[in-house]
Image (spheres, helix red, strand yellow):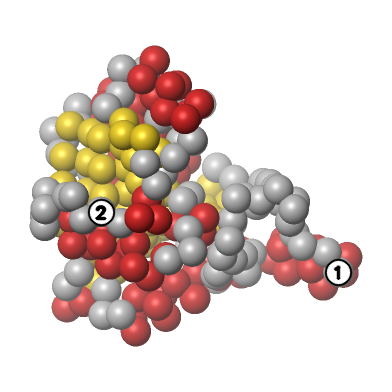
Amino acid sequence: MNEYELVTDIPPDYRIIGGMIHSASRVLDLGCGEGGLLAFLNRSRSIRGQGIELNEIAVHECVKKGLSVCHGDIESGLLEYPDRSFDYVILNQSLQEVRRADALLTDALRVGRQVIVGFPNFAWIGSRCRLFFQGRSPVTAALPHRWYDSPNVRFFSINDFRDFCTRKRIGILAAYYLRKQRTVTCLPNLLAELALFLLSADSTNS
């Protein structure tokens, strides 16, 4: 057991991502926010990490943590990064916030040997019930914003994402599903609030 697994206040998605990544890896975190995940991976995996974040206040918070973060818009692409310049590219809770999700994920798979994607599952049963019975856009722990102040521009399900990977011939190396602090193993498209996928550009690895 790793020492960080003994700490109870670590978000469950951070734990899973930490388990996917090898020590001393080169990691690029796209839409890294205030750097919580990067800081965790620095401590637990001794990564060589870099982040990209649009929000200037969040960038300043990253700098306070001693993280290497560039102020930039991931929507503009990753043209300045050579092929396979990172072992892992992370899009945790950021893919649903970009308009050109297809292009960004294609670029991430070029830059990274593997890509980690985490997103809220819009088809979770709690969201379905709120939409069906209340007739309003769901507000849940995984989707905490109301429609008028949400950073999300795309709402998709686990099944949607799997179909996308099949259509684009993206390899799914591993998948994890969460509800609160627990892993979901049965009917994830219905019962999981969050999903995490480990991807590669080679569909033969699926």
Question: Which picture quadrant has residue 171?
Answer: bottom left
- Residue on which the image places disc 1: 135
| Residue occupying the point 38% across, 70% down | 102
Q: Quadrant of the N terminus?
A: top left
The x and y percentages for residue 106 are: 28, 67
What's the distance in space between the residues labelled 1 and 2, CA to CA? 39 Å
Q: Contact (CB < 8 A) between labels 1 and 2?
A: no
Closer to viewer: mark 1 or mark 2:
2
- SS at circle 2: loop
Kind of residue sitting beneath label 1: Gly
Question: Which picture quadrant has residue 200?
Answer: bottom left
Q: Which mark is residue 17?
A: none
Camera-nearest residue between 89 and 130: 89
| Residue occupying the point 39% across, 15% down | 64
Kind of residue sitting beneath label 2: Leu
Relative horizontal placement of residue 39, taking residue 25 as reference (left or right): right
Relative horizontal placement of residue 123, taking residue 161 as reference (left or right): right
Whether residue 173 appears in this view of the structure is no
Q: Quadrant of the C terminus?
A: bottom left
Relative horizontal placement of residue 128, taking residue 64 as reference (left or right): right
Task: Name which of mark 1 and mark 2 comes first in the sequence.
Answer: 2
- SS at circle 1: loop
The residue carrying pointer 1 sits among few (fewer than 14), some (14 to 19) or many (20 or more) residues within 10 Å by Cα, namely few
| Residue occupying the point 36% across, 20% down | 63
The x and y percentages for residue 97 are: 52, 55
The residue carrying pointer 2 sits among few (fewer than 14), some (14 to 19) or many (20 or more) residues within 10 Å by Cα, namely some
Q: Is residue 11 above or below residue 78?
A: above
Camera-nearest residue between 110 and 182: 110
- Residue on which the image places disc 2: 78
